[in-house]
Amino acid sequence: MGTVHIVGAGLAGLSAAVRLTEAGRRVVLYEGAPQAGGRCRSFHDAALDRMVDNGSHLALSGNRSLLGYLERVGASDALTELRPAAFPFLDLGNGERWCLRPGGLWLFDTARRVPGSRPADYLAALRTLTAGPGASVADALPPGGPLYERLWRPLAVSVMNGAPERVSARLFGAVLRETLLRGEAACRPLFAEKGLSAALVEPAVAWLTRHGAELRTGARVDGLERAGERVAALSVDGERIALGSDDAVVLAVPAWIAGRLLPEAVPISANGRAIVNAHFRLPAPIDLPGGLPFLGLVGGTADWLFRRGDVLSVTVSDADALATLPADAVAATLWRDVARALGTPGAALPPHRIIKERRATPDQSPVHAANRPGPQTALKNLVLAGDWTKMGLPATLEGAVRSGEIAAQAVLTAGITTFSRLGLFPAFTLPRRGPI
Ligand SMILES: Cc1cc2nc3c(=O)[nH]c(=O)nc-3n(C[C@H](O)[C@H](O)[C@H](O)COP(=O)(O)OP(=O)(O)OC[C@H]3O[C@@H](n4cnc5c(N)ncnc54)[C@H](O)[C@@H]3O)c2cc1C
């Protein structure tokens, strides 16, 4: 059996690597950055003297591919689950607070719903499940009504990283179908309390190393050499790495890099949307209003606050405009929201670090969603993976892991003809795929 060369060690590449290694394939991962993790990583910030994440990430207990990936690498306890599910919110405009507590007969309990909403208002979510491929979230869930500004809009912006008018209703509906609509047990928030790398990346890298896979960091693939319908060699920082006749490639880089390496396989534009994060180091740990480790905000610039020890992190999605401002201006704007949320308006700006991920997620408009490529390409020994490929979900941790699994299965399926006669073909089952 040949080697599988995986380009990119983000969650998509790592999840493909785990599946392929598990299936007995030899795997080599090439990662251009000095560390694995891609858009989901932690680093030590010297100014704050703390480990911080490139951006606070929230997963949900319905993310079964992500949880399966963690289980496989022996890290089932890596994420902390908030049980029962609860989503606290604060309106910065009028100070009103509420906590969404899905589960059981929650829609019939005013204390567990958005203030002023009625049970029937929530049924509108079902419209995203039957939305046409061209529909945006705002087409399915139009502005107006008590839930738009306080639930659908904040949810769509944070899940899809784009305004409801611009992002695909189908992709959003796929998330609702796998989480909120499956009940409380599927929508418990999951946090990486010790950081993204410690929870989601390092356990996989350790598992892969233990099982014989090779991770080459600082190894940028800058070209694919073709011979007919196959990739004959990779160029890694200019060095030619020849592929054997049984070797395969999983290209698990972001859309904008894949578009450069293999333009014909990426029929979607390379645009991405920004997410801005601010990390504030406080003099001491604090409790957020609502008493939970995170808090949703409406009526300001900040979208979410996350508390980890004495570091308070702010996330702003769909943040292209904010990302054009200088870091000091971003910090001042976001700190104003934080100080108001904490009931200390005018509090002095603490030490901070601003991280602008200008291409945090790919374009998730209906047009792009409908044109996502599947794993197969015209090159017989190369498949695609990544949060921008066709796997039925938006660009999220869950989507990235699932895309890696789909790519791994495509590699293994392609090997059927070569290996089935020898009884070597290993198979695994994928979760049911969505409509996209
Ligand atoms: C700030 C921020 C907040 C987010 N919040 C959430 C959240 O709360 N919940 C959620 O579910 N998702 C969230 N996401 C989305 C999630 O992080 C991504 O969808 C996911 O990490 C993408 O994984 P990937 O493997 O597809 O791509 P990537 O993580 O981008 O991995 C691709 C890898 O390829 C490497 N690479 C690129 N070019 C080359 C090359 N030429 N040669 C070799 N290697 C190369 C890159 O360095 C990278 O490591 C967030 C993203 C960001 C940026």
Image (spheres, rainbow, N blue to C red):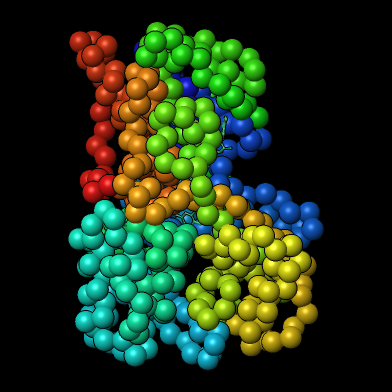
Q: Quadrant of residue 415?
A: top left
271 with respect to 181 (left or right):
right
Q: Position of residue 226 (x, y in %)?
A: 46, 14
Q: Quadrant of residue 305?
A: bottom right
Front position in the image: 98 or 392: 392
- The answer to whether one can see residue 104 in this image is no
209 with respect to 350 (left or right):
left
| Residue at the image position 61 percent from the left and 32 percent from the top | 32
Of the 4 image quadrants, the one containing the N terminus is top left
| Residue at the image position 64 percent from the left and 69 percent from the top | 312
Q: Position of residue 366 (x, y in %)?
A: 34, 54
Q: Position of residue 66 (x, y in %)?
A: 39, 48
27 with respect to 170 (left or right):
right
Front position in the image: 123 or 266: 266
| Residue at the image position 58 percent from the left and 31 percent from the top | 31
Q: On screen, 111 above or below 432? A: below
Front position in the image: 139 or 14: 139
| Residue at the image position 63 percent from the left and 84 percent from the top | 340
